[in-house]
Amino acid sequence: MNASSFFRPHVIDSLKDYTRQRFYQDVGAGITVGVVALPLAMAFAIASGLKPEAGLFTAIIAGFLISALGGSRVQIGGPAGAFIVIVYGILERYGLANLIIATAMSGVMLFAMGLLRLGTLIRFIPVAVVIGFTNGIAVLIMVSQLKDFFGLQVKAMPADFFGILRTLSDSFGTLNGEALGLAVMCLAVLAFWQLALPRLANAMPSTKSFSTIPGSIVVLVGATVAAKMMGLEVETIASRFGSIPSNLPAFAWPEFSWDTAKFLLIPATTLALLGSIESLLCARIADQMMADGPYGDRHDANQELMAQGIANIITPFFGGMPATGTIARTVTNVKNGGNSPVAGMVHAATLLVVMLVAAPLAGDVPLAALSAILMFVAWNMGEWHEFVHLRQFRLPYRATLLSVFLLTVIVDLTVAVEVGLMAACLTFIYRISSLSRAEHVQADAFPELAGHEANVQAHRLYGALFFGAVKLVEAIEESLPAQALVLDLKNLIYVDSSGADALLALARSCKKKHVRLIVCGLGHQPLDMAQRSGVLHALPDTDLVPNLSHGLALALGR
């Protein structure tokens, strides 16, 4: 396989037959997405415990790299709400220098996952686990924004859920009514813009132009102007973080301790796992949205992971934070006509121009407005209807989803995903083992067995013979006939090493008790496993027959 098949950015294929009209569509979509990304990038960085420019740097650098090198036609990369809780926890425990190293380590992992063609494995993560931690992260984001939403004076916010609640409770006496009022108004405007304005635009076409303006920008500008004109005593970006630089940072290698860095493997793995899940889920949603259009095609999961890896290796050393595919910005891109990775690159260029030209103006943005935007993003991020529909599902699904949700909120995302995957694996093993069965062939189905039941037995195996179902073979071994045992494996679709060992043990028991073992219908994977494990060598060729009828005839000497 040549190198281009391992690393082939989607932009190469997307630009074939590229027209001026498509370019104009990409530019329009890219500018719109850039405007949408501006407040989100700053808000995600602030909520993660970083300065607002970290989010802007990430949206610009990582956003450009993910679009230029990725495997999706329309996916937009940048800082994401899903990372807020993890990044805040790493910052609190290990510091900024080690966050940079952890992010770069996660980038190496992501690139390796793509290089090893592991992108499709992400799809095997159960939906209950994904919904559980997505909703859990959404709750944590909303809780973490209560401080700025209420304008509370808090010196340091802990990373754990109960610590956050305790700190908020202790600081509630410092509530700022003006900040709360501004935040509530911003939240109301966002809700109106998303829920009521589209209906109003349908009823009154003259208002349709307003619905094309992103609600987050309306809130950002409106809240900043209102706070200035009304002289509100609210905290702003400049009052907490100082002015935002109007240029990109230079490469900087952080100072860090190897004694601390060696503990970063688990946080880095969490960043890589979450980034890969978030990115590929976003890419699948984009595929579905593009399916009916003229440019609909599927993303390359492995190429996308490699692009995410490169972006996360490079961006942190230029003042950025972890990046991944972002659903809200990708959907905005598709809805506004984006049709190639050029739109994502234009989005990054738009943010760069805004930062170079208008960075000083961002200092006046009230933090209460950003907290309202983040709360609204978190609400839209959660799949709350799944809690209502839980009663429709079996207990294992409900237990997995709720345990992942509660562990994400109360304990830790890494623990939640580990427990969720373990619960899902155990549930899967149980389900498959319950679907596997052994059927004792009776004389009413095969009359030739009549009168010979004590000397000849026949059993059909269905499903998968794996470590969770070897009891089926062990039960047959405990009640062997006097003369011959016929096993019909035609309906067996899979045999693992434990299943093969069980068949070998059965063959040895039959040989020891002078019972002839006849195997029927071996094919496909079970046949391959029987050859590799030595099951076939334990049986004479004459006792391997194509079907049950031949096997019974052989056992009965006919």
Image (cartoon, helix red, strand yellow):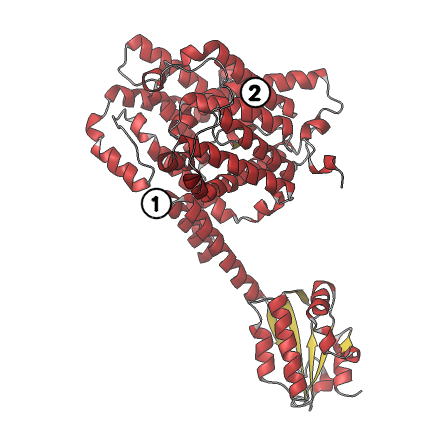
- Identify residue type, mark 2: His
Residue 464 drawn at (x, y percent): 62, 65
Q: State the residue in front, 299 or 372.
A: 299
Q: State the residue in front, 213 or 54.
A: 54
Residue 33 drawn at (x, y percent): 54, 21
Report the Cα–Cα distance between label 2 and label 1. Answer: 36 Å
- On screen, residue 467 versus residue 553, left or right, reads left
Residue 214 drawn at (x, y percent): 48, 20
The residue located at (47%, 56%) in the rendering is 423
**Secondary structure of the residue carrying numbered label 1:** helix
- Identify residue type, mark 1: Ile
**On-image quarter of the C terminus:** bottom right
Number of other residues with Cα within 10 Å of mark 1, as a class: few under 14, some 14 to 19, many 20 or more:
some
Residue 481: which quarter of the image? bottom right
**Secondary structure of the residue carrying numbered label 2:** helix
The residue located at (52%, 37%) in the rendering is 105
Q: Which residue is mark 2?
A: 347
- Inspect this view and state whether residue 205 appears: no
**On-image quarter of the N terminus:** top right
Q: Which residue is mark 1?
A: 410
- On screen, residue 408 versus residue 470, left or right, reads left
Residue 258: which quarter of the image? top left
Number of other residues with Cα within 10 Å of mark 2, as a class: few under 14, some 14 to 19, many 20 or more:
many
